[in-house]
């Protein structure tokens, strides 16, 4: 979205992202307080991307905080993988495989980042449930404000890690699955 664009309603965003409306509302409120979004009352009102979005986001960049969140995300995913390896029902990662395939074909850099984020949210839900998806959503949402979005080459390299992870999860191979998660992190923050 570009500065001045109107965001969809919180309920629509919640459904699209597969997270609760409360989480979306909290995120939107926080972004309004940070000056990244504007709320306008009235019939033509709503929540809009702030005119100075890019300046606000750049001021929020903090590599040290991003690294700490990246470590937390690594711990979360390694723990989920180790906890569930060998117990992932056959066929359940099909949605994740579809995201991997779509990532391979996507050309738009923003779409690549969106698909990768969806992969991690869906992975969290598959391995830990809806509550863990909420945790991952909050973590990734905060992290994306602390660093610039990764370039297409980084996202494509990470997608190869996604393929390895899904292959190893399907085999029930804990150690190689955890290595795939760690390799993903070495390609850059999530």
Image (cartoon, helix red, strand yellow):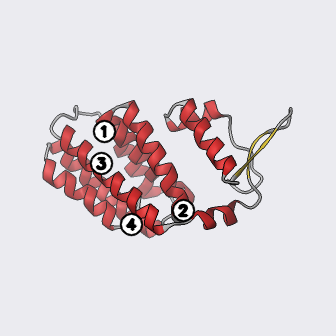
Residue that mark 1 sits on:
93
* Residue in view at x 33 percent, y 62 percent: 185
Q: Position of residue 52 (x, y in %)?
A: 74, 61
Mark 3 or mark 2: which is in front? Answer: 3
Q: Which of 120 and 61 is in front in this view?
A: 61
Q: Are marks 3 and 2 in contact (CB under 8 Å)?
A: no
Is label 4 in a helix, a strand or a loop?
Answer: loop
Mark count = 4
Distance from the alpha carbon under mark 2 to that under mark 4: 16 Å
Q: Which of 70 and 103 is in front in this view?
A: 70
Distance from the alpha carbon under mark 3 to that under mark 1: 15 Å
Q: Which of 114 and 185 is in front in this view?
A: 185
Is 73 located above or below residue 46 in the figure? Answer: below
Decide which of tag 2 and tag 4 comes sooner along the chain: 2
Decide which of tag 3 and tag 2 comes sooner along the chain: 3
Distance from the alpha carbon under mark 1 to that under mark 2: 24 Å
Decide which of tag 1 and tag 2 comes sooner along the chain: 1
Q: Are marks 4 and 3 in contact (CB under 8 Å)?
A: no
Residue that mark 4 sits on:
188
Is label 2 in a helix, a strand or a loop?
Answer: helix
* Residue in view at x 24 percent, y 55 percent: 164
Residue 108 can be seen in this image: no
Residue that mark 3 sits on:
77
Is label 3 in a helix, a strand or a loop?
Answer: helix
> Badge 2: how crowded within 10 Å, few (<14), some, or many (20+)?
some
Decide which of tag 3 and tag 1 comes sooner along the chain: 3
Residue that mark 2 sits on:
109
Q: Where is residue 27 in the image (x, y as percent from the top left)?
A: 59, 43
């Amino acid at each position: 979205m570009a500065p001045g664009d109107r965001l969809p309603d919180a309920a629509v965003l919640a459904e699209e992202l597969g997270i609760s409306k409360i989480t979306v509302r909290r995120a939107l409120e926080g972004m309004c307080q940070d000056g990244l979004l504007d709320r306008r009352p009235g019939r033509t009102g709503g929540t809009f991307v702030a005119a100075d979005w890019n300046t606000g986001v750049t001021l929020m960049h903090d590599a040290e905080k991003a690294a700490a969140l990246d470590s937390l995300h690594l711990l979360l995913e390694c723990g989920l993988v180790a906890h569930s390896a060998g117990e992932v029902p056959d066929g359940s990662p099909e949605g994740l495989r579809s995201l991997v395939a779509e990532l391979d074909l996507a050309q738009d850099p923003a779409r690549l980042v969106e698909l990768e984020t969806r992969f991690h949210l869906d992975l969290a839900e598959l391995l830990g449930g809806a509550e863990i998806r909420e945790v991952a959503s909050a973590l990734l949402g905060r992290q994306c404000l602390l660093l610039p979005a990764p370039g297409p080459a980084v996202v494509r390299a990470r997608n190869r890690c996604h393929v390895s992870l899904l292959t190893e999860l399907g085999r029930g191979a804990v150690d190689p699955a955890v290595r795939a998660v760690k390799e993903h992190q070495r390609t850059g923050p999530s």
